[in-house]
Image (cartoon, grey):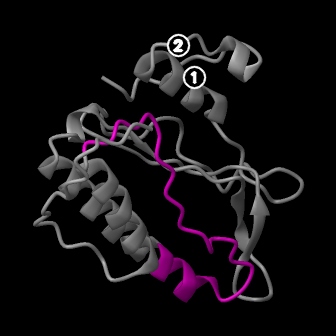
Amino acid sequence: AKLNSNGSAFAFSTEFPQSAFGATVRTACQVLGTGAEMAVLRLTLGGFDTHQNQPGIHGNLLRQLADGLGALRSALIELKLWQRTLVLSYAEFGRRPMENRSNGTDHGTANVHFALGGAVRGGLYGELPSLARLDASGNMGFSVDYRSLYATVLERWWRLDSREALGGRFAPIDFVV
């Protein structure tokens, strides 16, 4: 990263959420508001490993995510960076659709990813998951390999060859303009 030397702060009109994730979003936007040149910023919202009491915990986490991403979008528009920013969510595992005995769900094999930004074509990419097609462990199958998501970022966003990084060729997804 390259920070400019004047260290001036951008005066945001965006209201950032009063949460730990909101503070993370605010800090990232303040860094960008100094004129810093960044290829990647990683913002983290943990706690989605909900084996128990999932309804309340998950609802709160999704609210924090939505509020934080809304503020991020607003601040990036103020900074005139929205059109050239790609925001992606990722997770290391999915959840099984069947509730366990603790009012939660256990680790699964399929997951959802969100993409946001001025150059993102909205929509659903891949097939809707089917509860009628679970494997022997009760997991949903995936219709899009996550490496295709990464291939899209590498090839269509950064204009890099993805084969070496991904260990093969994976078809990009048409969610980036």
Closer mark to the observer between disc 1 and disc 2: 2
Say above or below: 46 vs 127. Answer: below
Horizontal arrangement in the rendering, residue 138 relative to residue 41 (left or right): right
Quarter of the image with the C terminus is top left
Q: Is disc 2 surrounded by few (<14), some (14 to 19) or many (20+) residues within 10 Å? A: few
Q: Amino acid at mark 1?
A: Ala
Camera sees residue 107: yes
- Label 1: which residue? 151
Asked if residue 12 is among those painted magenta in the image, a careful observer would answer no
17 is higher (above) or lower (below) than 125? below
Q: Residue furthest front?
A: 5
Q: Hey, what amino acid is under mark 2?
A: Leu
> Which SS class for mark 1?
helix
User: Residue 44: image x %, image y %?
Assistant: 54, 62
Tell me the magenta residue range. 35-61
Question: Horizontal and vertical percent for residue 19?
Answer: 40, 81
